[in-house]
Image: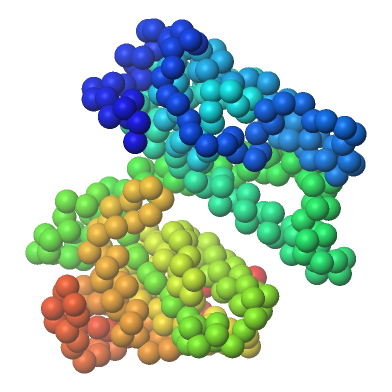
Amino acid sequence: MSVEDQQSGEDLDQEFDAVPEPSVDEETEVGPAPASVQTGPPTGVMSAERLAIKALEAKLLGGERKLRRREVAAGAGVSILSARKIWRALGFPNFGDEDVAFTERDQAALSRILDLVRAGLLTEDAAISVTRSIGQMTDRMVVWQIEALVEDMVSEQGIPDAVARKQLVGQLPALVDSLEEILVYSYRRQLNAGVQRLAVRAEAGLQASEEGREGDEDDSPLPLARAVGFADLVSYTSLSRRMNEKTLAQLVQRFENKCAEIISVGGGRLVKTVGDEVLYIAETPAAGAEISLALAQAFTEDEILPQCRVSMVWGRILSRLGDIYGPTVNLAARLTTLAQPGTVLVDAMTAAALGQDDRFVLIPQKSENVRGFGEIHPVMLARGRGKGLVLD
């Protein structure tokens, strides 16, 4: 950690008033510049492949790299330290003072983020957190998209993986604008849905939680009430040892795609996938129950994937950094390990919340001693009246 990072009491608002002179050496970067940075003009005649890469970069970055980090920071009216906080939150590598790594669009983006703080719309901490969310999510998104495009080219054109990755450079320019439009469209739709879930309807969920867990105050400080579920593929470890990389990738993709579809149709949200397991949430106990039953049934009927164990617990959670935390999440994870393949387990409190709904049948199981929770009373959830979730 540099001396600058250890300075206490320093924030963006204080730094905006004085832009450091470019001659002041605030930080010395050690080591070579990242491979992606062009520190000088190329020599000789560039190949067609190199020309395509350069053209794609100019399209994506909004022009040629011609600015150094000090110039970008000065143009945005902020110190290198503050600019670097934003760049690190976005996931950028370290750049040295002499690296020509930035474009005018980089400067405009930095100014836009800082203006939110200057206008009092965001605190520095909030700006860093929001920026980090964008950096991390878009990083995962572009990796997903590139691999999906490469896989499709390999499958459809019958070309080797390495060849597909080179050809992708020539195909992306025709896709970029449309993908960007879809990204912005999806962001606005998801933001609206998130506001409804996390703000507008949050109070109703808390009231339902109080009714379903009367007398249970252990998790009362947590701000949101949700149905938290896990679905875990059976025998994934042994299967993965017998599969080659391509087959395993197809299995994982099929699993995640099917989970995402069911959870979405049920009105829930897929929080994350970790190998052979998905974590999801829903706004009501009934919605969580419908999703859980649909997942268990779908994988029981799937001709390729193994069955899965499913659990669901209704209670309060803490939502941070795109993930969820709290005893409710931990209990749901513990219940998953107790469930039999193809079945859904809930805890006694969740069963009580579903007890008057004839769409569900609740079958008490033997008590279990669970680490961190002591003795619990699992209940198997089964289909009652109705068809459940209808998937097109």
In percent of width and height, residue 382 lies at: 39, 85
- Image quarter where the N terminus lies is top left
Please name whichever residue, 5 or 392, is drawn nearer the observer in this view of the structure.
5
The structure residue drawn at horizontal position 36% and vertical position 43%, both measured from the top left corner, is: 200
Can you name the residue that lies furthest to the bottom here? 366
The structure residue drawn at horizontal position 17% and vertical position 51%, both measured from the top left corner, is: 221
Q: From the viewer's perspective, is residue 70 above or below residue 155?
A: above
The structure residue drawn at horizontal position 57% and vertical position 36%, both measured from the top left corner, is: 32
- Image quarter where the C terminus lies is bottom right
Q: From the viewer's perspective, is residue 88 above or below residue 209?
A: above
Asked whether residue 356 is in view, the answer is: no
Q: Quadrant of residue 390?
A: bottom right
Q: From the viewer's perspective, is residue 146 above or below residue 377?
A: above
In percent of width and height, residue 242 lies at: 59, 88
In percent of width and height, residue 245 lies at: 64, 76
Q: Quadrant of residue 391?
A: bottom right
Q: Quadrant of residue 68?
A: top right
Left of 145 or right of it: where is 167? right
In percent of width and height, residue 348 lies at: 21, 78
Please name whichever residue, 65 or 309, is drawn nearer the observer in this view of the structure.
65
Can you name the residue that lies furthest to the left here? 215
Count of numbered badges drawn on the protein: 0
